[in-house]
Image (tube, grey):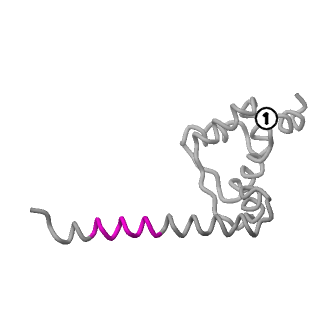
Amino acid sequence: MTNIASVLKLKISRVARKEVRSEAADLQKQLKRTSGGAPVKARVSETLDAATPRQFSATRLAAHRSKLGLPATAYGKHVGMSGAAIYLWEQGKSRPSAEQLQRLVGVCSLGKRAALEETGR
């Protein structure tokens, strides 16, 4: 026989998830009406500023660098760091500081063409 507390906990979590989904759908509808047809992602990214906390991922950094086709030294120049620091970040042996992370955010917005133009390739 199951414990009443565990059954109640499951029921509460199901109802809470349902409520959250419903509210999220309502907010999406409301946002579409107020955005005037502008893409939602563009409007959300415009509201992000330097004060927004960012999370660092070594695998995403390595994937972005390989997507741009840049060696670690060239990628490091965009961030203002050495190629060795980039390698250490990608391997997870060290992490960037908050200031360096903000510079990484700026580099992540670069496309392949812009990154190659800046490096002179």
Q: Secondary structure at mark 1?
A: helix
Q: Residue at x 30, y 68 (%)?
A: 11
- Residue 95 visible here: yes
Give the extent of the magenta segment. Answer: 9-19
Q: Count the labels in the image.
A: 1
Q: Is residue 81 magenta?
A: no
Give the camera-side residue of 116 and 91: 116
**Looking at the picture, how far across and down is residue 110, in whole percent?**
80, 43
Image height check: is 101 above or below 77? below
**Looking at the picture, how far across and down is residue 90, in whole percent?**
60, 39
Q: Residue at x 72, y 61 (%)?
A: 44
Give, as a three-letter code, the residue at label 1: Ala
Location of the N terminus (image quadrant): bottom left
- Residue 80 visible here: no
Q: Which residue is mark 1?
A: 74
Left or right of residue 107, residue 64 in this image: left
**Looking at the picture, how far across and down is residue 16, in whole percent?**
41, 69
Left or right of residue 45, residue 96 in this image: left
Left or right of residue 106, residue 97 in this image: left
Q: Quadrant of residue 73?
A: top right
Q: Is residue 16 magenta?
A: yes
Image height check: is 112 above or below 54? above
Give the camera-side residue of 87 and 10: 10
Q: Residue at x 17, y 71 (%)?
A: 4
Give the camera-side residue of 20 and 73: 20
Is most of the magenta stretch helix, strand or loop? helix
Q: Residues within 10 Å of mark 1 (few under 14, many from 20)?
A: many
**Looking at the picture, how far across and down is residue 28, in whole percent?**
64, 64
Location of the C terminus (image quadrant): top right
